[in-house]
Image (cartoon, grey):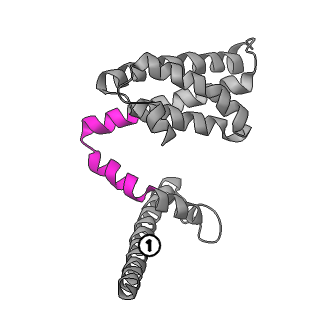
Amino acid sequence: MFLNKYFDTKMSLPQKIVRFIILIPFIFIFVPDWLVVHIITYILGFCVGKCDKKQNEIAFLILIVLALVTNVLRFIHEFVHPLSIPNYNVFTGWAHIFLGSSLFMISLKVFAHMGAHKVLDFTDKYSYEIYLVHQFFILGPLSLMAFSDYLVVNLFLIVLVTVLLGVLVKKTSDLIRKGFARMWKKRYIVKL
């Protein structure tokens, strides 16, 4: 609710950028260190999502440039010659934010050009359930990592089984939820 009002769709892109920058100190003050990057990435995505088409294109270009600059500097610092970057861990967090956000926007554009909205709709609908069950088939007694001698076959099988079980979990939970809703509705209406 707060972010909806804070990043109004009628605002200009510079206003949104200024408001985003104003939020950052509060995030660093009130959010635990390990969660800061995730929260900032969420708010950045929310802000970009409130942009119109023209603002979105400009925001996309800004993110690409920031991702390139920060990650090239990280590469130079790590592999070529150490640079004097104050608070390097925070800088690395920002580099990850820009890179992840840019890659996400690039993948959206690629999928949109391919007409793959059905794939995006499907993954959006079942993503939480797929997330819930994926670990069973990677680690532990149900792991499929050693199913065959071929890693590609194992990974394909893990994705396939994970998606199928995720869909099954979603459909089952929907049925249970609808059943409880009907029971609750009948019970509530009868008492009236």
Q: Residues within 10 Å of mark 1 (few under 14, many from 20)?
A: few
Q: In which quadrant will I find the C terminus?
A: bottom left
As rendered, which of 164 and 125 lies closer to the eye? Answer: 125
Is 24 part of what is drawn in magenta?
no
Q: Residue furthest bottom?
A: 190
The residue depicted at 36 percent of the width and 36 percent of the height is 108
As rendered, which of 82 and 87 lies closer to the eye? Answer: 87
Kindly tell me whether residue 64 is visible in this rendering.
no
**Identity of the amino acid at label 1?**
Ser
As rendered, which of 88 and 3 lies closer to the eye? Answer: 3
Q: Which range is magenta?
A: 107-127
**Residue 13, quarter of picture:** top left
The x and y percentages for residue 8 are 40, 30
Left or right: where 106 falls relative to 79: left
Q: Residue furthest left?
A: 115
The residue depicted at 53 percent of the width and 38 percent of the height is 42
Task: Give SS at disc 1.
Answer: helix
Secondary structure mostly seen in magenta is helix
Residue at the spot of label 1: 173
